[in-house]
Image (cartoon, rainbow, N blue to C red):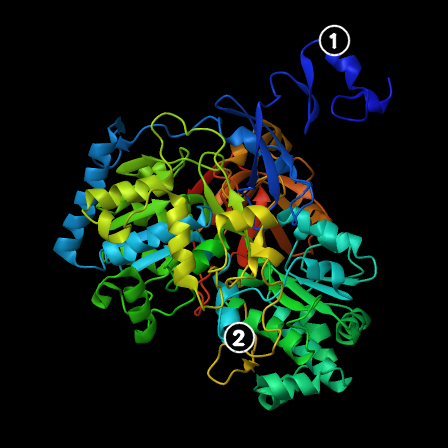
Amino acid sequence: MSWRDVPGVGTGHERWTERGGYSSDDRGGVMNDTRRPDRWIRTTCGYCSVGCGMLLGAKGNRAVAVMGDPDHPVNAGRLCPKGLSEHHTIAAEGRLTVPLARHGPGAAARRVGWDEALAAVAGGFRRILAENGPDSVAVLSTGQLVTEEFYALGKLVRAGLGLRHYDGNTTLCMSSAVAGYKRSFGSDGPPGSYADLEQADCILLVGANLADNHPLLAPRVLDNEAATVIVVDPRVTKTAMVADIHLPVRPRSDIVLLNGMIRLLMEEGLVDTAYVVAHTEGFEELAAHVADYPVERVVAECGIDAELFRRATLAFGRAERGFVGWTMGVNHSVQGTETVTLLNTLCLITGNIGRAGAAPFSITGQCNAMGTREAGAAASLPGYRAWDSAADRAEVAALWNIPVERLPDARGRAYPDIVDGVLDGTIKGLWIIATNPPVSFPHRGRLERALSSLELLVVQDGFETPTTALAGVVLPAAIWGEKDGTYTNSERRVSRVRKAVDPPGEARSDFDIFLALADELGLRDELYPGWKGPEDAFREWARVSAGRLCDYSGITWEAVDAAGGVQWPCPPGTAARGGTPSLYADGVFPTASGRARLWCVSPEPVSDKVNDRFPFLLNTGRTVEHWHTRTKTGRVAILESLAPEGWVELNPADAARLGLGADDRARIESRRGHLDGVPVRITATVRPGEVFMPFHYDELCVNRLTIDEFDPISREPNYKQSAVHIERSRSARAPVAVPSTRR
């Protein structure tokens, strides 16, 4: 049999359809009849921030297939393993189908109706607020709702309930990028586009393992054969393996590296002086600062080869179009914000911003982290407005037709500070939406103590999770494939998300839950006048964004459909050409002076120091098969079979010294807790003295080990540097995780 006779490939479909059980589909080719859809729905992937276009196949009220959208500008028909199996999440085990209530810690959850559940939430929060004031209730959201839901939630939380403390799990991954953009440019907003990867002469990826974390960006890098690709990463990641130059810096030495690069560029005359003079401020102070970072210091502190360092720096400096991309390897640090400003500075002093192929580009984490940053009213007012600006508050109050006094005059507590507020007794009620803190937040033992002390914990999710198991009220929510709206991806591209099937049981879309709760609170008509569905929320948000950097005012759902995605800023009349690919093309920045700021940054030492008791430095991250805490991917058989449990990566020299072999199991202890029964992978992709673990697994939760240390500006956690001890497992093969009292 020829390969062309395989179902869905080539032209041999007649043989398969004649055998029975198979039939031809216009889009999917020859398909098993049980998987052949009766309709294909164009939508956008609900995992990472790349924003791949998809076709979701439905048969009746079942999602039965998925394929990449060949016409979508982001992925041109390609999908990663998670995307190719995403339809399986919709009918996966563990879906929440009815509201639940639990009376007291440890009590069994009982089924309740929606009226009772909403009354419990509204009444419970109102009682706590009346007794303790506006600081006593907080909300933790996500980056995975549609923008229309984020906008509706922000209005409910801020203008309706009047809460001061509202944040999301986006603080755990992208807040340092946001804060860094604000410090350098005066505003959030990634300046570039994915097309820059195809047009750049040099691509510098810092702490960004695209092959695992953003797989559909990797082909753009690989297809640009003319570009010099430089990867800065302590590990020999899959992305580092295909780079022209890999700089395996020691953990927390990236600031030294970047200061050294800036100095070398100055010495070699590779600064774009005309751009610096016209569009930046702080250059003289920067030049004096980086004088302390000669090549010799960089090589010694970063642990890299001097010639490789020079080659990488000169390749970037001599490029006509230089692209800098980064993800969690930069952001997950107590100096994440400051490191982002240095990456921005690297682009500014070489003039690599505001034009094709040239940008400092933060590659976002979640499918709609951008949507909540722009419209969600958490860290900022909608439209990148500032909570502490009286003018901005007045403008939003007028747009929302509410008294300005209803709006908080400050951002309020960020995610880690909300946890602190629960522990110190200030916050007594908490609403968690579509996130799973016990697995994703650092120092899990401390987080669990916080959640168990609440008077009222409300959890809204599509699945049973370790978080829903702690909740007093559980609200069952629809997930991707079951609701309508939009996502905005890392390159500011707004794409449509469509409902293909109904949610299970009594589950409702998050949008409907927010409106129903507003109704219960007597606020629906005031907050959502005339709204019938999520498109009404989008239209209002577009009006609110008019004239702002993140201008959606020229975008409609119809325009998004016609263009296959539209990039903001998109004032009226620009949607037809797809919006705006690059920010700051005119060199004017939203700062008081109109100039970008060049910041001086000095490195700080790792606080969780290695010593004889804890001799290894633990790094954490992701693997391509799974997403976040495996709430969805852990229930997809093909993905779970590829990576069913966590592991620790150990250098061969360290493994030999410890007497550990491949397939052995290890006990790992930090100053905060320990894990037992962790499978060992022996690999030279990690340096001696350093180890790596993926963070996805509840059963082997690496966040029982991680330090609860946060960037003082962005409040993003440092997941990347925790000192640990490793020895042979003391347990049977089943993993064990317990807190520690050792220091």
Q: Nearer the viewer, residue 333 or 296?
A: 333
Q: Earlier in the sequence, mark 1 or mark 2?
A: 1
Q: Nearer the viewer, residue 460 or 541?
A: 541
How many C-alpha atoms fall within 10 Å of the one at disc 1: few (<14), some, or many (≥20)? Answer: few
Kind of residue sitting beneath label 2: Phe
Task: Estimate the x, y position of residue 569 in percent, counting from the top left.
Answer: 53, 64
Residue 321 lies in what quarter of the image?
Answer: bottom right
- Regarding residue 291, the answer to whether it shows in the image is yes
Q: Quadrant of the C terminus?
A: bottom left
Task: Estimate the x, y position of residue 703 in percent, counting from the top left.
Answer: 47, 48
Task: Judge left or right: residue 370 versus residue 14.
Answer: left
Which mark, residue 423?
none
Up the image or down, 433 lies above or below 733; here it is below
Outermost residue to the left: 131
Kind of residue sitting beneath label 1: Arg
Q: How far apart are the two marked residues, 1 and 2, measured between alpha carbons?
A: 63 Å
Q: Which residue is mark 1?
A: 19
Task: Judge left or right: residue 230 versus residue 607.
Answer: right
Task: Judge left or right: residue 79 versus residue 108.
Answer: right
Q: Residue at x 59, y 67 (%)?
A: 191
Up the image or down, 385 lies above or below 520; here it is below
SS of the residue under disc 2: helix
Q: Residue at x 32, y 75 (%)?
A: 391
Residue 577 lies in what quarter of the image?
Answer: bottom right
Q: Quadrant of the N terminus?
A: top right
Up the image or down, 626 lies above or below 26; here it is below
Q: Which residue is mark 2?
A: 185
Task: Estimate the x, y position of residue 527 in percent, counting from the top left.
Answer: 26, 53
